[in-house]
Image (tube, helix red, strand yellow):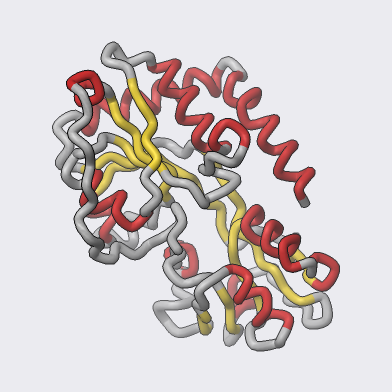
Amino acid sequence: GGTGAVEGNAPTAPLQVAAGTAATARKINLLTADDYAPFTDRKSLNGGLVTEVVQTAMTRANPAEGFAIHWVNDWSAHLEPLLSNALLDLGFPWLKPDCVQTPDNYRCENFYFSDSMFEMLVLVFAAKDRPVVFEKDDDMLGKTLCRPKGYYTHDLDKDGRNWLKDGKIKLEMPDKNADCFTMLLEGKVDAVVVDEFTGRATMKELGIADRIEVVQSRPLSIEGLHVVVHKSHPRAQELLDMINKGLAEIKADGTYQKVIGPHMTLIWAEF
């Protein structure tokens, strides 16, 4: 299963999109999907943290033609064909690869990114009985790390870290987060490297929080969650400017903090 964190762009069966009414066609249409809690999920508070931030920023931007958020539960179809053909205008939430270092990355080549709607910490999760030191990048040399298949890997190479590129670490990529944590407890990997929410939610689900240590010395990376627009979209720059302006305004007057507060309270209460 995919999440908004997915890097892959597997070909998929063509998706049927209903023609919609003339009114829909004129609106600015945004695209997201479920199953990426706490960021986007209709079972989460107000559709998830990022959904509510995007909704609030768009409401503030107040486009003359209006806007609508659509849920299409096939993440792999979002970038291609839905956004690439401008069947929908803006997609979220997507991670931004290091486009300076990897300009030929699919997302860098084909999409523009908004400012970050939310930033998450990617942390190192280790087994309490086999602690891991992470004070500097070289502490990870020769280690075996785990992250589910289809997730981003750009942070393992960014800023000259080049862990994957130069074979400094081994990366196991099983199907699910739960598999990573099981492998960690079985001693098959040295650490799981995922965002703090996904990691803590999985630990809770498996009932293993007391056996896991979250390495507090530093995050592995800080990843922003962005809105994307395809470069071929006729209004690409205008749409980006619009959502960035809305976001800047809600941050400036404290609305942003009010929006994310209740989400954060709920998220931490869960753990």
Image height of 195 relative to 270, above or below = below
Image height of 170 relative to 27, above or below = below
Q: Mark yes or no: residue 229 visible.
A: yes
In the image, 78 versus 194, the foreground residue is 78
Q: Position of residue 220 (x, y in %)?
A: 60, 62
Name the image quarter holding residue 213: bottom right
In the image, 191 versus 207, the foreground residue is 207
Q: Position of residue 148 (x, y in %)?
A: 52, 70
**How many numbered discs?**
0
Name the image quarter holding residue 131: bottom right
What residue is at 61 percent from the left and 19 percent from the top?
Answer: 254
In the image, 24 versus 157, the foreground residue is 24
What residue is at 34 percent from the left and 65 percent from the top?
Answer: 8
Q: Position of residue 257 (x, y in %)?
A: 63, 26
Q: Position of residue 39 (x, y in %)?
A: 55, 43
Q: Residue furthest top?
A: 64
What residue is at 33 percent from the left and 41 percent from the top?
Answer: 228
Quadrant where the N terminus sits is bottom left
Q: Mark yes or no: residue 100 visible.
A: no
What residue is at 20 percent from the left and 39 percent from the top?
Answer: 87
Report whether 214 appears left or right of 62.
right
